[in-house]
Each structure stands twice: as C-alpha cells, then as structure tokens.
Image: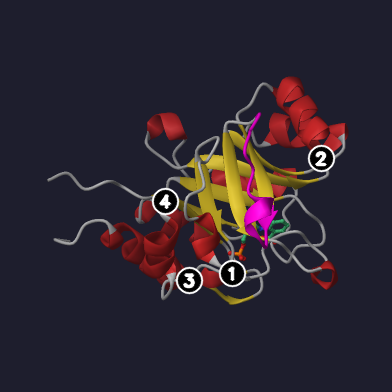
C-alpha cells in the first residue's frame, strides 16, 4: 500500500516564526501576500528578508509563492527581482495572467472564485489553479476571507490543470474537505491564525498534521 502525500501551502506569512513553523513541519509552499488591502501584506523587501531564514527549494525548503492581485508591471518586476519567487499566484483577468506569465517566465497559478458548478474552469493556460470560495463584494479582497464553498460542487469536475483547494480551511475541517473534494493539495491562510494576519505556529503544525494524516490511515 502506498500513501499519497497531500501538498500543503500556508499563505500570508508575516513573521520569522511563521516561516520557521512551515519549514519545520514540511509545508510544500509558503505564500507571501503583496496586496496592500490584506492584513498579511508584506513589501518585497520584507518578504525577501523573511524568506532568507528558510532553505531554498533546491536545498529542501518550501517553494515561495508570491500572491498578487491585479499587479502592475512595476510590482511584478520588484517582487521577482527582490524575492525571486518560485511561483506566482495571480488574481487577474485571463489575458493579463498570460501576459505576466510571459513577462516573468515563472510558473503561474490562477486563482478562481467558485460559488456554483458553472464557475469551475474547463480549460487552463496556467500551470496550476487555486480553487477557492468566491469573495463577496463587501470583503474588499478576492481571497483570504476564511470562507468555504460547497465542496460537492467539485464532484465530477475534470480539472484542466493541477489544483489546490482553498477557502476557509482549518485544522478541524481539512480532512473532511479533502474527502469531499478529492483535492490533492490544500492552501490555508485565515484558518491557521488567531486574528487576521496573526499566524499561529501551533495551528500551522496541526493543519499540516491533519491534512497529511487524511490519506494515511496507518499514521
Ligand atoms: O490572504 C489574503 O489576505 C489574500 C488577499 C488577497 C487575495 C487572496 C488572499 N489569500 C488567499 O485566499 C485563499 C483562501 O484564504 P483563507 O484560507 O480562506 O483565508 C488562499 O489561497 C490564500 O492564499
């Protein structure tokens, strides 16, 4: 019997202790948020200095994901020059996402907000997709709101690219979410915080443990 390994992204890190918890507990990806309206906002310089303590992916550390919401070219270039991310997670129009992919040459994950089955993409021009709850207009940001969606919507969906499940995941619901959605990778921000932007190393550890235990009944 072989147990599959669930991919885990912890997003919105702002402190060295957050990065340290992700590295120690074996997160696959760490996310840095470059959206000024977010409580997890970091500048490119702050993100680079945070990540300096983590081993690079080549040295066995997590891959660095830069999260950008409708960025202009100047921000894209600054993030790429200063942080040197492994992946860009983008919230933008499809044409702009394609243009940023060409400009940077980096793997791109397009974030897609879902509230009903017809929102699920049938084609993809990106290397990955982040499937998460559609944000209500009043939220003020397109993600990171701690909202779930009906995971049963995903039944029968033929994903056009590798994808992560996101939106409202927590240590308490991640096993159910994996079971209901069939996802092989998950992404969390609010669910491992004690207040908006305040990550908890203990919750990060629990989330990773619960997600990984899900597919390994002998663990
Ligand atoms: O985390 C943020 O503040 C954020 C801001 C703007 C766009 C996306 C953001 N976060 C991403 O949203 C999803 C779900 O987050 P949550 O677990 O529901 O809080 C995840 O991909 C975050 O990376």
Q: Is residue 99 magenta?
A: no
Within 8 Å of ligand 1, the CB of disc 3?
no
Q: Which quadrant holds residue 76?
A: top right
Residue 163's x, y, as percent? 52, 44
Q: Earlier in the sequence, mark 4 or mark 2?
A: 4
Majority secondary structure of magenta residues? loop
Q: Nearer the viewer, residue 171 or 38?
A: 171
Number of marks in picture: 4
Q: Which residue is mark 4?
A: 27
| Left or right position of 18 against 137 | left
Few, some or many C-alpha atoms within 10 Å of disc 4 (few <14, some 14-19, many ≥20)?
many
Residue 32's x, y, as percent? 64, 50
Q: Which residue is mark 3?
A: 170
Q: Which quadrant holds residue 215?
A: bottom left
What residue range appears in magenta?
113-125
Residue at the spot x=42%, y=63% of the render? 180
Residue 89's x, y, as percent? 65, 42
Few, some or many C-alpha atoms within 10 Å of disc 3 (few <14, some 14-19, many ≥20)?
many
Element under label 3?
Answer: loop
Few, some or many C-alpha atoms within 10 Å of disc 2 (few <14, some 14-19, many ≥20)?
few
């Amino acid at each position: 019997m072989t147990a599959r390994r669930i991919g885990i992204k912890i997003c919105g890190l702002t402190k060295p202790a957050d990065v340290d918890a992700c590295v120690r507990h074996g997160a696959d990806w760490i996310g840095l948020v470059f959206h000024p309206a977010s409580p997890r906002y970091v500048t490119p310089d702050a993100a680079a200095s945070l990540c300096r303590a983590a081993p690079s992916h080549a040295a066995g550390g997590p891959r660095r994901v830069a999260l950008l919401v409708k960025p202009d070219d100047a921000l894209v270039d600054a993030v790429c020059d200063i942080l040197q991310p492994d992946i860009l997670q983008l919230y933008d129009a499809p044409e702009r996402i394609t243009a940023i992919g060409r400009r940077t040459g980096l793997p791109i994950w397009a974030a897609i907000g879902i509230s009903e089955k017809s929102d699920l993409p049938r084609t993809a021009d990106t290397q990955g997709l982040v499937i998460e709850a559609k944000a209500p207009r009043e939220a003020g940001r397109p993600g990171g709101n701690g909202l779930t969606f009906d995971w049963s919507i995903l039944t029968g969906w033929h994903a056009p690219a590798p994808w992560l499940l996101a939106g409202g995941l927590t240590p308490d619901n991640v096993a159910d979410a994996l079971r209901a959605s069939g996802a092989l990778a998950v992404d969390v921000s609010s669910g491992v915080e004690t207040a908006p932007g305040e990550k908890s190393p203990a919750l990060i550890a629990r989330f990773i443990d619960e997600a990984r235990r899900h597919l390994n009944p002998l663990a």
